[in-house]
Image (cartoon, rainbow, N blue to C red):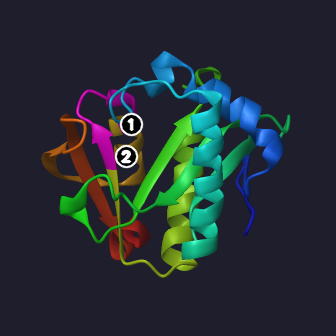
Amino acid sequence: MITIETERLTLRGWRDADLDALAAINADPEVMRYILDGSVRDRQRTSQDLRAMIRGWDERGFGLFAVDVRETGAFVGWAGLAVPEFLPEVMPAVEIGWRLAREAWGRGYATEAAAASLQFAFDDCALDRVISIRHVDNTRSARVMAKLGLAFESHTVVPDYDQPVAVHAITRSGWQAR
C-alpha cells in the first residue's frame, strides 16, 4: 500500500492502533447521520469494517486510506476509493468517499484528502471515471463534491435502506481539465 502526502495530511495504510479512533468516529451520531440508515457502529462492527478495508486493498489494489494530520500525526478519519456494491444500479463503478471525525470538519481536510485520492485513482489506478454518492440532505458532502469537480448525475434510492441519494461523477479528462 502506498502513502500519499498532501500539504497538511498523510494518507496511509491502516494500523491496528487505528481501531479506537475509528470506533469513536463511527459511534458519533452526527458523523453517521447520512451513512446508510444513519445508525452508529459499535467497536465490533468497526473492527470488521477495518478488516474489510484492509482486504479491499489486497483484493483490488486500491481502497480507503487512513488520514492523519501531518503536523500532529493525529488520525482524523479516512478517504479513498471503494466499490459501491450497496447501490447495484451504478455498477460497475468506483466511488470516492470520506469520513472524518467531527472535530476535523470545516478545515478542508475532506477536500484535500479526496483530491489526493482522485489523483491516485486517475494516475495510479488508471480509472476513467469515479463516482461519489451522498444522502440528498448531506450538503457538506455536496460542497466537497463541487470543489472536486464532480458533476451531479442522478437521484436514486439505496435499496436495502430506502435512502434517497444523489450520484455525482467525474471523468479522468474532467479531472485533468480542472
- Give the Cα distance between marks 1 and 2: 6 Å
Residue 154 point in image, percent of width and height: 14, 51
Q: Position of residue 11 (x, y in %)?
A: 70, 54
Counting every numbered tag in the picture gives: 2
Residue 141 image position (x, y, % from top left): 39, 36
Residue numbers of the magenta segment: 133-141
Q: Which residue is the site of mark 1?
A: 141
Tell which of 45 and 111 is nearer to you: 45
Q: Between 164 and 142, which is closer to the camera in this rendering?
A: 164
The residue at 37%/46% (across/down) is 145
Q: Callout 1: helix, strand or loop?
A: helix
Amino acid on which the number 1 mark rests in the picture: Ser
Q: Which residue is mark 2?
A: 145
Q: Position of residue 153 (x, y in %)?
A: 17, 55
Q: Which mark is residue 161?
A: none
Image-quadrant location for residue 163: top left
Q: Callout 1: 10 Å neighbours few (<14), some, many (20+)?
A: many
Q: What residue is rendered at 50% in x and 63% in y?
A: 118
Q: Where does the N terminus fall, quadrant-wise?
A: bottom right
Classify the position of the C terminus by image quarter: bottom left
Q: Is residue 154 left or right of residue 150?
A: left
Q: Which one is in front, 17 or 129? A: 17
Residue depicted at x 43% and y 72%: 176
Q: Is residue 50 left or right of residue 114?
A: right
Residue type at tag 2:
Met
Q: Are marks 1 and 2 in contact (CB under 8 Å)?
A: yes
Asked if residue 104 shows in the view, the reply is no
The relative height of residue 17 versus residue 94 in the rendered view (above or below) is: above
State the SS at label 2: helix
Asked whether 154 falls inside the magenta stretch, the response is no
